[in-house]
Amino acid sequence: MEIREVRSLVLLSESGSIRQTADSMHLTAAAIHKQLKLLGEKLGVRLYEKAGPGLRMTPAAEVVLPHLRNLLAAEEAARNALDEWKGLRKGLVRIGAGRTIASDILPYMLKRFRRSHSSISLFVETGHTQHLIDRLAQGVLDLAVLMFPELAEQENFAVETTWDAEIVLISNLPHLPAHCSLAELAKTPFILFQRGALIENLIERYFSELHFRPRVVMRFDDSEAIKAMVRSSLGISMLPYWGVHNDLKRGALKLIRQKERKLTAKVALVSRQHAGGSPPAQAFIAMARKFDSCGLRLAPH
C-alpha cells in the first residue's frame, strides 16, 4: 500500500466526504476515489459505505484505521528526523583513528566540532591503519584520520585534507645535548618501533638517507611503551610530535633538536569515494579543513 492511499482513507474517516478529502490533499475527487479503490483491493475489504448524505467507515476499515494512523505518524517522524539530519540538528559521525591520534589529535578536533554542532553524536573507533581502511570500505566508518594516507590511494577513498606531522627525537638522558647531529648520537641507545611497522619504515628510510645507523636496544609496537622506556632513561627515540608535546611541556621528556633536515609524515582525513557523505560527515570535513595543525609540528626555533 502507498502512503497517499493510507492518508486518503484516514482523512475520509475524519471528514466523511470524498470531496473534502480531495480538497485536503489538493487532488480531484476522482483521484481520491481511485486511491481508495486500490487500497480496498490490496486489503481485500470494503473500506467505506454510504450513510445518509455522507460516507462512513466499514467495520473492516475501523479495524485497520488505528494501524494506518500509526503508519502515518511513523512516516512523519521519519521525515522530521531526516530534516533534522539534513539541517545538522541531529546525526552521527563515525570516525576511525590510531590510538595515539585518537588520544592526542582528535580531542582538539572533536572539541572544535562540538562547539558548533553540539547535537551531532560522535563515535570513535581505534585501530591500525589497515583495519581502519577496511572499516571505511565496509561502510562502518564515515571518516578516518590516517598517518599514512597513501595506503588508501589504491582503494576507493578520497583524501579530504592533509597535515604535515613532524617526527622528533626525544630523550630523558641528562648528558645529551639539546641540539646536535645524528652522528653525535651513534653510541646512544635507541628505542624504536618493531620492524615492518609503517612508522618504523619511515624512520629507517630517514636514517638511511642520512647515512646514520642507530644502536637499537629495544623495539615496541606501541608509542606509549616507547615513551615509558624513554622516561625511564633507557634510551632515546623518534616519535610523532603530537604524541609527546604534552610530555615535553611537563618536562617528562626532553627534545633533541637535530642539525639535519626534519622528518615529517602526512596525516590525512580520509573518506570513501562516491559514498555521498552524510551532512554531519560533510560538516566534520569542513571543520577539519580549517583545523589548526600546529600541534603536529614543532614551533620554529
Image (cartoon, helix red, strand yellow):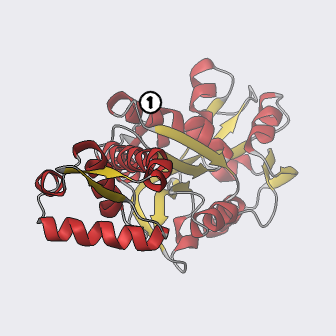
Q: Nearer the viewer, residue 122 or 160?
A: 122
Specify whether 185 is left or right of 298: right
Q: Hey, which residue is sitting farthest right in the picture?
A: 217
Q: Is residue 193 above or below residue 115?
A: below
Pinpoint residue 280: horizontal percent, then vertical percent. 38, 48
Residue type, label 1: Lys
Q: Hey, which residue is sitting farthest bottom in the picture?
A: 154
Q: In percent of the image, x 34 and y 49: which residue is there?
A: 79
Look at the image and tell me whether residue 298 can be seen: no
Q: In percent of the image, x 48 and y 61: which residue is there?
A: 270
Pinpoint residue 203: horizontal percent, then vertical percent. 66, 60
Pinpoint residue 30: horizontal percent, then vertical percent. 15, 71
Q: How many marks?
A: 1
Pinpoint residue 73: horizontal percent, then vertical percent. 40, 44
Q: Quadrant of the N terminus?
A: bottom left
The residue that label 1 is drawn on is: 111
Q: In percent of the image, x 32 and y 71: which residue is there?
A: 37
